Image (cartoon, grey):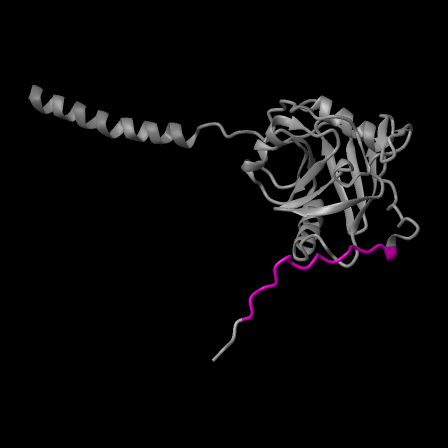
Amino acid sequence: MRIQNGFRFLLVVLVVIPFAAAQAHHTAPQRVAVEPDGPTAVIDTSAGRLICRLYSKQAPQTTANFIALAQGTKDWTGSDGAVQHAKPFYDGLQVFGVTDGISSGNREAFGLGTAGPATIAEKTGLDFDRAGRLAAMAPKGQQSGSSFVIIAHADLEKSKGAVVFGQCDEASIVVAAGISHELLSTDNHPEHPVVLRKVMIVAEGEPMPPPTPAAPGEATLTIPPLPAPAIAAPVVMLK
């Protein structure tokens, strides 16, 4: 009888423990997405509007820098070396397609000036686990003073080279994906460039600004075609 009772107790334990473990696994708390609480960046381009709310609490330095450049409250250096004061940094720059998204803000790469040297990447605790992330470029831990990217798909690999400081809405994700597709399909050499017309910062409760009109001459802007390869492709003769 004692052996039977012991066997029954062991059987109950063997059944209950896996069930309890399964229940514990099933009820494990899910990670709650952190939502931005800062102002909204309205990015008007010639191919559509992007609306992204900023993470003022999690990324205070990056957010403040982006706002200052957008509003012209931060001085920057022009292509001629002259200091640009009270002049928005991003207006009129070109938008480029990148893997799973779009990018802009890199004046230095095209000899159009600079917002200052790179800094150590800010630690925000935010990741690229959601589509629509707005992030500052930070290759090898060196954060750019102006370049940013918006991703159309979640991509955790991006965290190795960028710092999240905003989250764009669903409509903006669709716009970014469309721009990226069109630009990458031409190797970033479309007939007409996508122009970043203006970045506006909207505080909570304020109405959205009207769309930014095209700048004079924008419609006639063109991009030179890709140069021919240095070595001509071999000709294959069919027999």
Residue 217 located left or right of residue 139: right
In which quadrant of the rendered view does residue 83 lie? top right
Q: Kindly identify the residue that appears in the image at 61 percent across and 59 percent down.
A: 231
Residue 180 in sight in this render: yes
Position of residue 227 measured from the top left corner of the image (x, y, whole percent): 70, 57
Magenta stretch containing residue 85, yes or no? no
Position of residue 17 measured from the top left corner of the image (x, y, whole percent): 28, 26
Position of residue 75 measured from the top left corner of the image (x, y, whole percent): 86, 26
Residue 24 vs 191, above or below: the answer is above
Stretch in magenta: 219-235
Residue 41 vs 213, above or below: the answer is above
Residue 167 located left or right of residue 155: right
* Total number of numbered discs in the rendering: 0
Position of residue 176 measured from the top left corner of the image (x, y, whole percent): 69, 47
In which quadrant of the rendered view does residue 41 lie? top right
Residue 189 vs 206, above or below: the answer is below
Q: Nearer the viewer, residue 70 or 25?
A: 70
Q: Kindly identify the residue that appears in the image at 58 percent across and 41 percent down.
A: 154
Residue 171 in sight in this render: no
Q: Nearer the viewer, residue 106 or 155?
A: 106
Q: Residue furthest bottom?
A: 239
Magenta stretch containing residue 229, yes or no? yes
The dominant secondary structure in magenta is: loop
Q: Residue furthest right?
A: 216
Q: Residue furthest top?
A: 2
Q: Kindly identify the residue that appears in the image at 56 percent across and 70 percent down.
A: 235
In which quadrant of the rendered view does residue 150 lie? top right
The N terminus sits in image quarter: top left
